[in-house]
Amino acid sequence: MSSEAVDYDAQVAAVREAFEREFERFARFQGGAGTEGLSLGEAETLLRELGELRTRHTAKKSALAQLMKLIGRVPAEERAAFGQRVQALNNEVATKLDEAQAALDNRIGQLKVERERVDVTLPGRRPRRGHLHPITLLRQRIEDIFVSMGYAVEDGPEVETDFYNFTALNIPELHPARSPQDTFYTTDGLSLRSQTSTVQIHAMQKRRPPLRVVAPGRVFRRDTPDATHNPMFFQVEGLLVDRGINMGHLKGTLSEFVRRLFGPDTRTRFRPSYFPFTEPSMEADYSCFKCGGAGCRLCKGSGWIELGGSGMVHPNVLKAVNIDPEEFSGFAFGLGIDRMCGLMYELDDIRLLFENDLRFLEQF
Ligand code: DAH
């Protein structure tokens, strides 16, 4: 060995020592042990610090990297031995770092699983389920009855032109129903339909006879709300047009309808009436479902409850949609759904149906 001989072993030892000194605090994590008491925060901090330590001791400019580069410059006779030592140190450092890192990773994984664990034995929170509105429930029962009698369910617009709301329904130019005191108008002369009878016109234009439709929906009238009135309410319209239809068909249909809705013993009664779009016209009543006709508070002592208006479709209405009244005839009826709903549930105030108060709605 020459006098300026470099002590290569000492260099390797110095690098090892520097690493050991810093690694000491992680030494207890070797072999996957020593992490039991660590909190998630502590383990994460240690892992980050270990990463920094790895960079300092193994990156390109680290002392260890310098040693690796030195191998090529060491005199040939010492190169093999030196190279082996450096390599051994390199492996040792890598193993230690990897083992400590694995232990910390493991602990962190465990703690995260722990933190996110769900106690499947806890009783669940029952989702609050809504349900259909009483008017919808009744509307669907009515639809079902008519569908079972061969009717189709029709829909129509709530905003209408004069033609559909009045003219085609044979309502004369100066009829009070057209007055803005009764009907809501938009500034450009359209109106909110005041009756579902408008759908008769749409249905006949669209389907042509023979046809059978019911059309439930909202209607609007300028009424001051009180216990029995609301400016928006629901009706269901019925229309049948075919060859040879007469009043007998109408009476039979309405009688069968109330029997299916209120029970087989329900009776009907028909009174002459007037509507511009039917001739002849009549009002239908049915025997009170509460007292069976004896008279009670619900039917105001009369034994009868009003069902709605009806009649044979006026020839002018058929003509308005180019149906020949010589060939076809039909009947129509219009029933109030909310009024029926109010009676069935014995509501003192019809406005309850529109206030959306959960204390009320939850009772259905
Ligand atoms: N549209 C009428 C109203 O709102 C009810 C009505 C009466 C409908 C007779 C009809 C009918 O179809 O034939 O008061």
Image: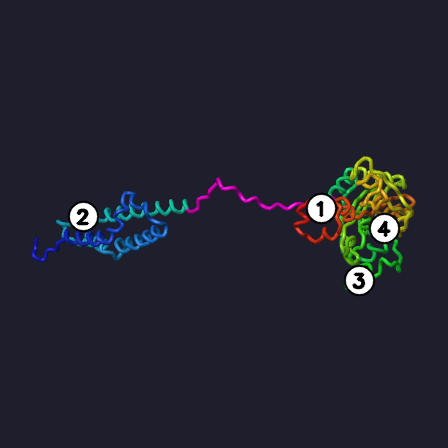
Name the residue rendered at 61%, 45% in the picture: 129
Q: Residue 239 placed where, x, y %?
A: 83, 45
What separation in Å lies between label 3 and label 2 (alpha carbons)? Answer: 99 Å
* Amino acid, disc 2: Arg
Which label lies toward us, 1 or 4? 1
Query: Is residue 276 positioned above or below 261 on the image?
Result: below
Name the residue rendered at 88%, 58% in the picture: 175
Taking the magenta stretch, the answer to whether it contains residue 105 is no
Name the residue rendered at 28%, 46% in the picture: 29
Residue at image mark 1: 134
Q: Quadrant of the C terminus?
A: top right
Among numbered discs 4 and 3, the one appearing first in the sequence? 3
Query: Is residue 302 positioned above or below 231 on the image?
Result: above
| Pointer 2 with pointer 4, Cβ within 8 A | no
Residue at image mark 2: 85
What separation in Å lies between label 2 and label 4 (alpha carbons)? Answer: 105 Å
Residue at image mark 3: 189
Q: Residue 11 placed where, x, y %?
A: 16, 54
